[in-house]
Amino acid sequence: MSIDTVGDFLTIIRNGIMVSKPFVIVPLSTMKHQIALLLKEEGFIRDVVVEDRHMKVLLKYVGGESVIHEINRMSTPSKRLYTGGKSIKPVIGGLGISVVTTNKGIMTDKKAKALNVGGEVICTVW
């Protein structure tokens, strides 16, 4: 049995949004921190604060509604989802993003397509 830490991270964010929490606290790892920084850069969360072995993710709301409407895990430990640089599909017509881990780091689908690098599709956010 394997533990899906990234899936747990996304579920914690999803559950925090469902009950309108101002922030959620998750265990720290390099991959989760990079995903959180990417979500901050794209405007889906307000901020990320690293504390000891935990990370505080400040969720973003506009007019009482969450900026994140849906956050889904695409590649799971039992079924990996890889895509090439030219075949990356946009999320909701370009309104959302896919988080892709490549040999050049974790990046959005738009940046991966521009650099023409493929990789594992971690999740989609819109």
Image (cartoon, helix red, strand yellow):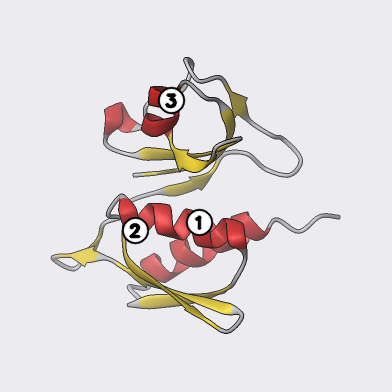
> CA–CA distance between discs 2 and 1?
10 Å
The amino acid type, in three-letter code, at marker 2 is Lys
Residue 91 placed where, x, y %?
A: 37, 32
Label 1 Cα crowd, 10 Å radius (few <14 / some 14-19 / many 20+): some
Residue, x 61% and y 80% (percent of image)? 53
Q: Secondary structure at mark 1?
A: helix
Sequence-wise, the earlier of marks 2 and 1 is 1
The amino acid type, in three-letter code, at marker 1 is Gln
Residue with the most extreme left position: 63
Residue 110 placed where, x, y %?
A: 36, 30
Residue 103 lies left or right of residue 99; in this view the side is right
Sequence-wise, the earlier of marks 3 and 1 is 1
Q: Which disc, if any, is residue 115?
A: 3
Residue 33 lies left or right of residue 29; in this view the side is left
Q: Which disc, if any, is residue 40?
A: 2
Picture quarter with the N terminus:
bottom right
